[in-house]
Image (cartoon, grey):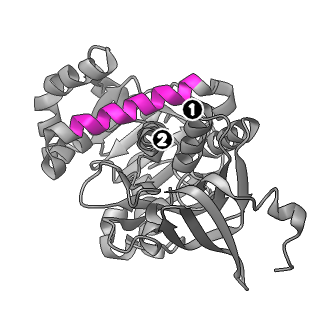
Amino acid sequence: MAQVSFWEKESFFAPQDIIIAGSGFVGLWSALHLKLTYPSYKITILERGVIPTGASTRNAGFSCFGSPSELLSDIDLMGEDKMWQIVTMRYKGLLEIRKHFSNAAIDYDDCGGYECFTKNSTDWEDCAAKIDWLNKGLKSITGEKNVFQVADEKIAGFGFKGLDHLIANRLEAGLHPGKLVQALLQKVQSVGVQVITGIEVKSYQSNDAGVTIESTIFGDKEEPITFTARQLLLCTNAFTKKLLSNIDIVPNRGQVFITAPIKNLAIKGTFHFDKGYYYFRNVGDRLLLGGARNKAFTDENTEEMQITTLIQAALEEFIQQHLLPLTPYTITDKWSGIMAMGSEKTPIIKAITNNVFCCVRMSGMGVALAPIAALEVAALMR
């Protein structure tokens, strides 16, 4: 890197009150909450990619808080109290998005959602038996009665084959995650947050005086550059182990594809199948499908942002078997994103030292969780 000028030292690279590593959903929401609370603070976000790199702009665009089988499965994973706790966070997070952004700004589609089941599946039997209990719990969170309702009568209209039961969720929606990140970027910059891209945080040193952050300009040569701040917030989600080796995070790849426009596409809404391991939705008259990582858990526990033949074949088999059995289609785009999972689904929000904090592990629900997780870490940093 060329020598830093006097002017750059006193502007772009000046000491900050807070530096945030990562400009995905969590980093952007955290910057917004902190700046609105402390308008005089100098806050900079460092992002290693040209745009946010991870899951925020590479997910399926679901505005959801969990399908019935996923919620029941989460009880087995982490207990009933934590399941309801995380559903509350997700729902409040979705409300926070609506508070800040218009439907048009983020392509919000209030379409309703569904979970699909095959005949005689144990998931269907469990969900059907406990739907009233789930609705009672959801009413205390959402204020709405009968959020989940059996909707088998809609199956024929969607043109499904081999999917025999549906449970509808009228509070679910779709949105455009790329436009949501763009809107958040514009909002944080409008209130005075600086965002510098192409910078990867490599390490930090914390002491009573503040934090020194050793970074590199991301690229082939990875030239070093140093930042200083009073506080550092790590919002690097699946990539946090590079900075905190003992943290309970396992990177998980999620693969997705989308078709070209399909004439008279009957599938409208957001859909889940197999505890959420498969998910699909219409994007206008295109069909988006993602998931199937349960076909190769070990292989998909990776930071490699690639697509694989095995998972893509499983997704195509699903679309041909269940969704478009008689309809020709063309896939136009395939991609993957990297999520952060762990031993449970609650985010990790904590102080690492007296001036280093982290807000990570969104467990594939960053759209919904990030606004509230960011509020919590902003309060902790005070």
Is the stretch drawn in magenta largely helix, strand or loop?
A: helix
Image mark count: 2
Mark 2 nearby-residue class (10 Å; few <14, some 14–19, many ≥20) = many
**Label drawn at residue 378:** 2
Amino acid type, label 2: Ala
Tell me the element at label 1.
helix
Q: Residue at x 63, y 44 (%)?
A: 181
Q: Magenta stretch: give its range.
A: 83-99
Amino acid type, label 1: Thr
Mark 1 nearby-residue class (10 Å; few <14, some 14–19, many ≥20) = few
Residue 139 left/right relative to 338: left
Q: Is residue 329 visible?
A: no
Q: Is residue 240 magenta?
A: no
- Percent coordinates x, y for residue 179 in the rendering: 67, 41
Residue 275 left/right relative to 217: left
Q: Is residue 89 magenta?
A: yes
Q: Residue at x 59, y 69 (%)?
A: 213
Q: Residue at x 55, y 36 (%)?
A: 33
* CB under 8 Å between discs 1 and 2: yes
Extreme residue in the bottom direction: 221
Vertical arrangement, residue 24 with respect to residue 64, above or below: below
Residue that label 1 marks: 37
- Percent coordinates x, y for residue 320 in the rendering: 44, 55
